[in-house]
Amino acid sequence: IIDELKSSNGHLMIGGVDSTVLAKKYGTPLYVFDVEKIRKQIRSFKTAFEKNQLKNQVSYASKAFAVKAIYQVMKQEDVHVDVVSGGELYTALQAGFPSEKISFHGNNKSAAELKMAVENHVGVIILDNFLEISLLSQILKATEQKVKVMLRLTPGISAHTHKYDQTGQTDSKFGFDVESGQAKQALKLVLADPNMEILGIHAHIGSQIFGTQGFVLLAKKMIEIAKSFQSELNYWPEVINLGGGFGISYTDDDDPITADTFITQISDELKKVCQNVPEIWIEPGRSIVGPAGYTLYSIGSRKDIPGLTSYLSVDGGMGDNIRPALYQAKYEAVVANKMDQENQETVHIAGKYCESGDILIENLVLPKTKPGDILAVLDTGAYGYSMAMNYNRNPRAAVVFVENGQDKLVVRRETYADLIKLDGDY
Ligand code: LLP
């Protein structure tokens, strides 16, 4: 892959643009997205569904990366998006994203957020808990509106991934428990509410999942649940939403599964256990934007500890990518202006934040570098910018989209003035 990205002058190319030129033009740290890669990934999910002849909907889980420009790409690609807060909903609407293609998630949506969703006619609200059912019911009554809903269920499936990325096990803060009958109770309430139209059932088993097993199990389980709903409450879902969580390859140790394999195996299972398969929705976030994102940093200071190791510091770190510190996430990186040089040493890549845990990559093998060289960390498109913060009052980095050899600034770099914009005096 890395060979494909090299230009003849040994520079890393992204979407037909020399990454070192981008670093110079916009400064570092800089998030760069190859938009064509995003489009291709969306299309591969769609194609896989079509091949398997399943009625389907791809919904981008925008928590992975939520800025106006990405909602606009999703609009162009004619997919749905899911949002998990008033802020994501606001961003999507401001971007001109059609509200009827928005699903609204969250385990503690406020009355204000629910009202905002109803007033803006979102496509579907994914109900997570009993308080939400009653809040929404009151809002619908008061505003004389109707809305489509789905029920988020915790199906009792543990995904093999980081603990923080598991969501489908019984002991989870999300959704209605199936085992104990909460899900059925919720369905009864919704069926009895004249202002709620129940579109289907939803479950999400976790994130950065490699095997297909969990999804196949989930597909089977959701059909079982649907059948029990049908026999006991005479309700059959129009839609089954299987959530997101398809893993991507951050390093050579990761063995990702293609969209085609995931969808084909899910489809085979569904057809095996059900004659009348409902429309299947998925909500990938990471797999759509992750591999398309690169973070460019300028290399700065260096500390060599004789006989032990070397730390190479960059001008960003945990503020633009919290994942290594939070989940011990691993990444690959290259020296963007030295792609034609041999790797010669092993170093730790340290961030600039005042925190010992701010190490972006351990034991990275690189060519010899000097200050000012550009380090490109790969596959940073998901949960990078969206989890960025201002720790140590570092301004958040800019975001650039590249496509067909053209670059476009889609989020400008924060300034020091931005940092104190919300501060008052005392
Ligand atoms: N649908 C629901 C209901 C979700 O909760 C999530 C992710 C997704 C879809 C999308 O999952 P994806 O396809 O992106 O794996 N910050 C963590 C990931 C948290 C994921 C939360 N929910 C990380 O950086 O690994």
Image: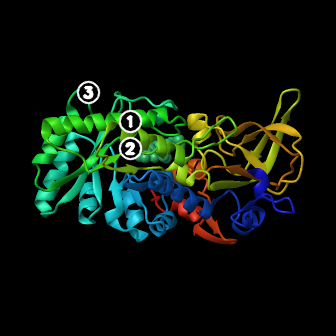
CB atoms of marks 2 and 1 within 8 Å: yes
> Marks 3 and 1: which is nearer the front?
1
Q: In which quarter of the image is the C terminus?
A: bottom left
The kind of secondary structure element at disc 1 is: helix
- Is 74 situated above or below 380? below
Q: Mark 2 points at which residue?
A: 242
Q: What residue type is labelled 1?
A: Leu
- In the image, what residue occupies the spot 39% across and 52% down? 54
Tag 3 residue: 179
Q: Is residue 97 above or below residue 218?
A: below
Q: Which numbered marker is on residue 169? A: none
| Circle 3 crowding by C-alpha within 10 Å: few under 14, some 14–19, many from 20 | few
Q: Which of marks 2 and 3 is nearer the N terminus?
A: 3
Q: State the residue in front, 277 or 354.
A: 277
The foreground one among 301 and 236 is: 236
- Residue at figure coordinates x 60%, y 48% from the top left: 319
Q: Is mark 3 on a helix, strand or loop?
A: loop
The Cα–Cα distance between marks 2 and 3, rounded to whole angstroms, is 18 Å
Which residue is denoted by mark 1 in the rendering?
Answer: 218
Q: In which quarter of the image is residue 178?
A: top left
Q: How far across and how far down the image is residue 129, in percent?
A: 24, 40
The CA distance from mark 2 to mark 1 is: 7 Å
Residue 200 falls left or right of residue 58: left
Q: Is mark 2 within 8 Å of ligand 1?
A: no
| Quarter assignment of residue 20 | bottom right
Pointer 2 local density, CA inside 10 Å: few below 14, some 14–19, many at least 20: many
Does residue 184 sit above or below 423 in this rendering?
A: above
How packed mark 1 is, by other alpha carbons closer than 10 Å (few <14, some 14-19, many 20 or more), is many
Inter-mark Cα distance, 3 to 1: 14 Å
